Amino acid sequence: MRKLLEVLGGLLLLTGGCGVVREFWPAFRIMGFSDRLIGRVGFLHGWELFAHIVLAVLGLVMVVVSGRTDRA
């Protein structure tokens, strides 16, 4: 379970971070699938930067929680 949380959290953190960078620097096209993923959700139109920040924070939380699972 710990490894799964680490991997998923790391992917979310990377995806959200790349999305934030891409919002400020449009020439940055690495991890472009997150742009298509968030662009397809209708209620997030206009809130893409916020959605990428939420993805990055959620990924960070998952990585931190995965580090604490064995200690509990």
Image (cartoon, rainbow, N blue to C red):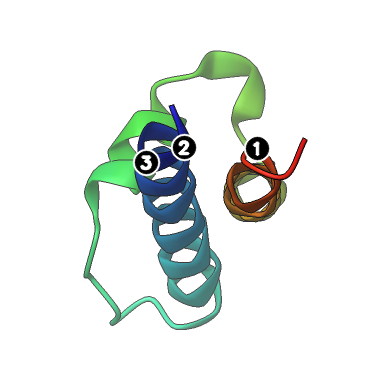
- Amino acid at the residue labelled 2: Arg
The answer to whether residue 71 is left or right of residue 1 is right
Tell me where residue 22 appears, x and y as whole percent.
43, 71
**What is the CA distance from the residue labelled 2 to the residue labelled 1?**
7 Å
> Does the residue at mark 2 contact the one at mark 1 (Cβ under 8 Å)?
yes
Residue at image location 39% in from the left, 22% down from the top: 40
Q: Which mark is residue 10?
A: none
Q: Read off the residue under disc 3.
A: 3
The amino acid pointed to by label 1 is Thr
| Residue that badge 2 annotates | 2
Above-or-below relation of 30 to 68: below
Q: Which residue is at 30% across, 37% downward?
A: 36
- Quadrant where the C terminus is found in the figure: top right
Q: Which of 24/52 is in front?
A: 52
In the figure, 17 relative to 49: above or below?
below
Q: Which residue lies at the image location 38% right of the left edge and 76% below the top edge?
A: 26
How far from the left and from the top, in percent, is residue 68? 70, 47
- Tell me the quadrant of the picture where the N terminus can be found: top left
The picture places residue 4, in percent across and down from the top left corner, at 37, 33
Precedes in sequence: disc 3 or disc 1:
3
Secondary structure under badge 1?
loop
Marks 3/1 in contact by CB < 8 Å: the verdict is: no
Identify which residue, 65 or 57, lies in the foreground. Answer: 65
| Residue nearest the viewer, comparing 46 with 68 | 68
Label 2 Cα neighbours within 10 Å, binned few <14 / some 14-19 / many ≥20: some
15 vs 21, left or right, is left
Structural distance between the alpha carbons of marks 2 and 3: 4 Å
